[in-house]
């Protein structure tokens, strides 16, 4: 009996395939997942370390996700071990883990509205 892959499974497969690299949001959306953020939340509750970052390019906001953290790092090492019998593959896996655990190159704004100035509203 063949089981259909759930949306959560397909999203996790995409993140694993990235091996610690940032996955652009359009690739996530291409999976046709309804409420991708809910699926990410489910994966996080299951213990997967999933990071997100945002970059602004003029008026365009780009969003990325990647598998990271302790659980993410162990998945990356396991994938590397399963997919390579080359000498030195563990060294390469260590490089991937380091990349996966590295902080974003660009600081991520804590504000929902990016760098919009704070304004005070006085309703009198």
Image: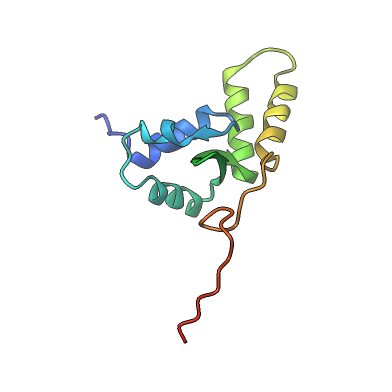
35 relative to 74 in the view: left or right: left
Q: Is residue 88 above or below residue 4?
A: above
Q: Is residue 74 above or below residue 95?
A: below
Please give the name of the residue rendered at 34% of the width and 47% of the height, measured from the top-left corner: 35
Q: Quadrant of the N terminus?
A: top left
Please give the name of the residue rendered at 55% of the width and 74% of the height, measured from the top-left corner: 120
Please give the name of the residue rendered at 57% of the width and 22% of the height, measured from the top-left corner: 82
Q: Nearer the viewer, residue 82 or 36?
A: 36
Please give the name of the residue rendered at 26% of the width and 29% of the height, measured from the top-left corner: 2
Residue 84, image x and y in percent? 62, 16
Q: Is residue 110 above or below residue 26?
A: below
How many marks can you see?
Answer: 0
| Furthest-bottom residue in this view | 124
| Furthest-front residue in this view | 124
Residue 86, image x and y in percent? 68, 12
Q: Is residue 2 above or below residue 40?
A: above
68 relative to 65 in the view: left or right: right
Q: Quadrant of residue 85?
A: top right
| Furthest-left residue in this view | 1
| Furthest-top residue in this view | 86
Residue 10, image x and y in percent? 38, 34
Q: Quadrant of residue 26?
A: top left
What colour-coding does the image apply?
A: rainbow
């Amino acid at each position: 009996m063949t089981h259909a892959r759930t949306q959560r499974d397909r999203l996790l497969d995409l993140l694993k395939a990235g091996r610690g690299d940032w996955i652009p949001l359009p690739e996530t959306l291409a999976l046709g997942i309804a409420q991708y953020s809910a699926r990410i939340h489910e994966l996080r509750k299951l213990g997967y370390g999933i990071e997100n970052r945002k970059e602004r390019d003029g008026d365009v906001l780009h969003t990325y996700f990647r598998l990271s953290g302790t659980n993410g790092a162990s998945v990356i090492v396991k994938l590397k071990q399963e997919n390579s019998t080359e000498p030195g593959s563990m060294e390469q896996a260590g490089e991937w883990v380091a990349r996966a655990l590295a902080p974003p190159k660009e600081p991520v704004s804590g504000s929902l509205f990016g760098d919009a100035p704070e304004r005070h509203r006085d309703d009198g």
